[in-house]
Image (tube, rainbow, N blue to C red):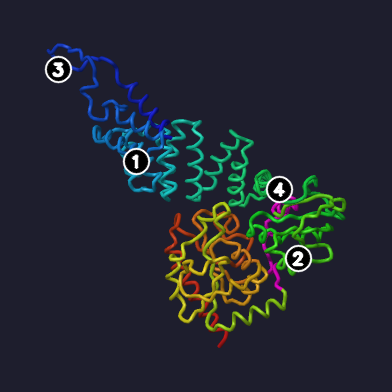
Amino acid sequence: MFGRIFRNLFLRTRSRTPRSEPVATRPGEADVPVPSRRAALPPMRAPLFGDPMARGRKLLAEGNTASARAAFEAALADDPLSGPAHAALAELDRREGRIDSAVAHYRTVVARHSDLPALLDSFGALLVDTGDFGEAARLLTNAAELDGDLVPARENLARALFNLRRFDEAERQERWLVARDPDAVALHLRLARLLLLQGKFDEGFGECEWRLRTPGFEWGVRGLPRWEGGSSVGKRLLAIAEPGLGETILFARFVPELAARGAHIEFLVPAVLERLFRSSFASENVHVTVEATADVAHLDAQVHLMSLAHHLSLARGALAARTPYLRVDEGLASRWAEEVRAHGGFRVGIAWAGNPQRPGGEGRSLAAGALAPLANAVPGATWFNLQRGLAADAPRPFAMVDLMPEVEDFADTAAILGALDVVVSADTSVAHAAAALGRPLVLLAAHEACWHWEIAGEPSPWYPGVHMLTAEGPNRWERVVDAAGARLGELALTARDVTR
């Protein structure tokens, strides 16, 4: 990035600095040739690649960041309007997390070099990261207009438009990128996300099939062909869970539909979901297992769960879970209900962090401290931790009952969810489980829209009744937390009225 920006700045400046040229004169004065305009230029026209800049670039290439910074700062001291020095320091600041300083440097250089697409792209990408999507979109649109083939600018523009919820415009950028690189899996998946967010399910789920080419989809049976739709009557199919627990819970609803169409199904799931899925889906035609069978002679084909949404050709109305489709074993439900109800008050479960190993996990999570205002949202409420694997000394938003050390798998978690009055959760597998069980759910949704929960700006048909609150920008959760507190207060009052 440094080299690209420096090269553009250097070529631009050099092309506008002739060796000699006449100067305008007043009537009666002789034209005086000027050997070089360079000496007469303001600081910005001074040589852009003096010794400090060259030294800084060399030090940076050697990995000596601190000395490179000192060299760039020396170049800036010699020429306070030096474009390359500002650009170099902006990138160093960005790398080191000095975002305000990086933005200030970029503003200085962009004000004087607004016709350099690579520079506009770099600044625009930084603004997307900071959540200033409007200005980012303006800069990146200019970059794309100046250089129609600048792929990074198109990618960053799509990101900015996506976060502005201008999905149709973002879709046009993603289609351009796919047309340019039609075999890029990541591009097809980004396009799929935009299509699904707009309710364009047929094409969207078709584009989702590109996910089968990514790591994480090897789980299954080698040599067994994929089922790609058509009649399933009498077919023996291996239905395979998605890599993410949340998506597995979301799309498991289609397994009974496949069985109803005459298929015999082996349902391959991770161990943490086995007990819950057996109580929810096991039947004469559905066998839940955690072991991929070695003998495939009795199987006709295999299919991953999300692919069922594509191959079953379901109408939008069929996507909604009309009734809870997860069920907990009665004995297990009674055991955990007794544990939960030993604690009085309005019982609220809370999960605030997604799986950091999953794509986007960090962006979907809240810091524990961000939830602290909820402590006093409902006087007399009893809070229950729903985060599995939380270390004893890990930060918690406030005091809460922690039953999770006793939890074995999602069957236990689901039984706890069933005994709570309401669940508050970030976009996690716990949120999916609560919604699939039909429990009252207050969803703390990240600013970056997710088609699991939102379609065309409206609440998703996947889980009717979920109360979704969306962050105003990356990690901007303050109003969401305040709104969640208000919603919990309303639910608590309703619960009290019902019990009177």
Q: Residues within 10 Å of mark 2 (few under 14, many from 20)?
A: many
Checking the image for residue 218, the label placed there is: 4
Helix, strand or loop under label 1: helix
Q: Residues within 10 Å of mark 1 (few under 14, many from 20)?
A: few
Q: CA distance from mark 1 to mark 4?
A: 44 Å
What amino acid is at disc 1? Ala
Q: Position of residue 124 (x, y in %)?
A: 42, 42
Q: Earlier in the sequence, mark 2 or mark 4?
A: 4
Helix, strand or loop under label 3: loop
Membership of 324 in magenta stretch: yes
Q: Earlier in the sequence, mark 3 or mark 1?
A: 3
Q: Earlier in the sequence, mark 1 or mark 2?
A: 1
Mark 3 vs mark 4, foreground winner is: 4
Q: What residue is rendered at 72% in x and 68% in y?
A: 275
Q: Which residue is mark 3?
A: 26
Q: Which residue is mark 1?
A: 66
Helix, strand or loop under label 4: loop
Mark 3 vs mark 1, foreground winner is: 1
